Image (cartoon, helix red, strand yellow):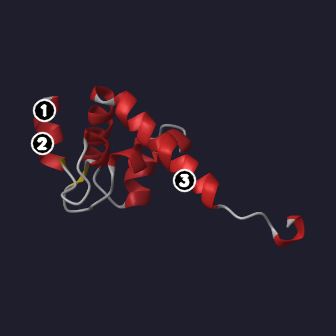
Amino acid sequence: MNIDTLIGQYLEPNPHRPGRDEARLKAYGVAVWALVAYFQAADRDVDRVAQDYAVPRAAVEAALAYYDRYQSIIDARIEANAAERSDTVQPPLAAR
């Protein structure tokens, strides 16, 4: 199966959040950037990502193929998410 077919079979634009950085898995709703971030954190183990997200391995492969095409956009989205999380994390009560 060629890359375009694989991507077309498993990915779609998010109708609620336009932009290439918000593409998601059809029927699962998982954002590509979230899968990629987890893939990077999970020692680049495709099978683990598929199992932990309960999606087909081919869906993860489609997300990674999409990432190869739009790496800078997806990386920026991952970084933005990390920045959002660090801005909202409260210090422990003892540190306040």
**Amino acid type at image mark 2:** Gly
Residue matched to label 2: 8
**Viewer-nearest of labels 3 and 1?**
3
**Viewer-nearest of labels 3 and 2?**
3
Residue matched to label 1: 4
Provide residue 10's location: percent of width, then percent of height: 18, 48
Depth order, front residue of 40/16: 16
Task: Please say if 66 is above or below 91.
Answer: above
Task: Please say if 20 is above or below 3.
Answer: below
Q: Earlier in the sequence, mark 3 or mark 1?
A: 1
Depth order, front residue of 55/94: 94
Real-space CA distance between mark 3 and mark 1, rounded to the nearest whole angstrom: 32 Å
Q: Give the secondary structure at mark 2.
A: helix
**Amino acid type at image mark 1:** Asp
Q: Earlier in the sequence, mark 3 or mark 2?
A: 2
Residue matched to label 3: 84
CB within 8 Å, label 1 to label 2: yes
**Observer able to see residue 1:** no
- Which quarter of the figure is the C terminus placed in? bottom right
Q: Give the secondary structure at mark 3.
A: helix
**Amino acid type at image mark 3:** Glu
